[in-house]
Amino acid sequence: MKMTPELKHVRDKMLPGVITSTGFLGSDSRSLVDIIQADEEKAASLGLDWEEAADKLFLFLEKGKEGLGETITLENVWQVTVHEVRGFLPCPFGDGLHRKHIVEVKNPSEQILIHYSELSLHLLRTHHFLQGKGSGFRLEPGLLKKICDALPSSLSG
Ligand SMILES: [Zn+2]
């Protein structure tokens, strides 16, 4: 992927106060291409499957919604809370709107704590964009790999 004027425009939309108050980049000064490429390389070195990671985060979202705002526990160890937030956020890449719902996933025994929105999940699946370093919604490839390894594909609970 090359840095194009369109991508520069996309990056501008990720700054604080444009789509969300805190933005998507944290303290990261790299270009979008550099951020995505570095994460793709990291994912490849870890053996992380992007689709599997997206599917599993989607599963938490779908199962978590059944809690209607309360925390539910899956497989005895995964504590999932979906905070329903009204409204939609546009993808900074300009290809759709996503609900603002926030998913929080905790697994204390694996030392996993992440939270993400439906937009974060779309950015992961469609654009391989995990957000900049220092962003509160950044999804580290290492953590995603840990989740893929620890969470069975078919859940009970
Ligand atoms: Zn998009």
Image (spheres, rainbow, N blue to C red):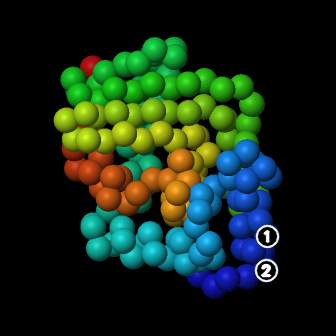
Element assignment for label 1: helix
In contact (CB < 8 Å): disc 2 and disc 1: yes
Front residue of this view, candidates 95 and 110: 110
Quarter containing the N terminus = bottom right
Q: Where is 109 relative to 21, above or below?
A: above
Mark number for residue 141? none
Q: In the picture, which quadrant includes the C terminus?
A: top left
- How far across and down, in percent of the image, does residue 122 sit? 58, 50
Q: Who's the residue at 59% across and 63% down the image?
A: 27
Is 65 drawn above or below residue 98 in the view shown? above
Is residue 34 shown left or right of residue 14?
left
Residue lying furthest front: 27
Q: Is residue 42 left or right of residue 75?
A: right
Name which residue type carries label 1: His
| Alpha-carbon span between mark 2 and mark 1 | 6 Å
Q: Crowding near pointer 1: few (<14 within 10 Å), some, many (20+)?
A: few
Q: Amino acid at mark 2?
A: Pro
- Residue 153 percent location from the top left of the image: 27, 41
Give the labeled residue for mark 1: 9
Q: Is residue 6 left or right of residue 155?
A: right
Residue pointed to by mark 2: 5
Q: Secondary structure at mark 2?
A: helix
- x and y, in percent, of residue 57 in the image: 42, 42
> Is ligand 1 closer than 8 angstroms to the Cβ of mark 2?
no
Asked if residue 155 shows in the view, the reply is: no
Ligand 1 quadrant in view: bottom right
Q: At x 39% / y 76%, what residue is drawn? A: 41
Residue for point 47% across, 39% down: 115
Q: Does 52 sit above or below residue 154?
A: below
Can residue 64 be spotted in the picture?
yes
